[in-house]
Image (cartoon, rainbow, N blue to C red):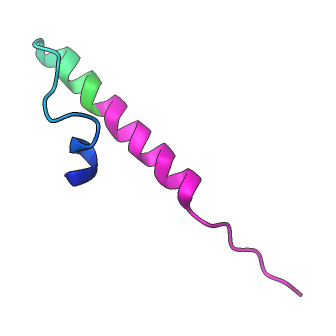
Amino acid sequence: MRCLKAFGERIAARDPDRQTAEVHIRVALMNRFSALGTAEIVRVT
């Protein structure tokens, strides 16, 4: 939840469908940032 709030405390949209889309966009951004920050593990032989 802390990470979700990093993009803003409140949901800006008033329409329920737009609120859902806004939350999905925030979650997609968090997942992308997590993927960028994850180290790639490569086996050395």
Q: Residue at x 33, y 35 (%)?
A: 26
**Residue extending furthest toward the top:** 15
Q: Position of residue 21 (x, y in %)?
A: 28, 23
Q: Which quadrant, please, contains the C terminus?
A: bottom right
Tell whether 15 sits left or right of 22: left
Query: In this picture, which residue range is highlighted in magenta?
Result: 24-45
Q: Position of residue 36 (x, y in %)?
A: 57, 51
Q: Residue at x 56, y 62 (%)?
A: 38
**Residue extending furthest toward the bottom:** 45
Q: Main secondary structure of the magenta part?
A: helix
Tell whether 21 sits left or right of 28: left
Q: Position of residue 7 (x, y in %)?
A: 29, 36
Q: Residue at x 21, y 25 (%)?
A: 20
| Res 27 → quadrant | top left
Q: Is residue 40 magenta?
A: yes
Tell whether 10 sits left or right of 37: left
- Most foreground residue, 19 or 11: 11
Tell whether 29 sits left or right of 3: right
Q: Is residue 12 above or below residue 28?
A: above
Q: Is residue 13 above or below residue 30?
A: above
The mark tally for this picture is 0
Q: Position of residue 40 (x, y in %)?
A: 67, 66
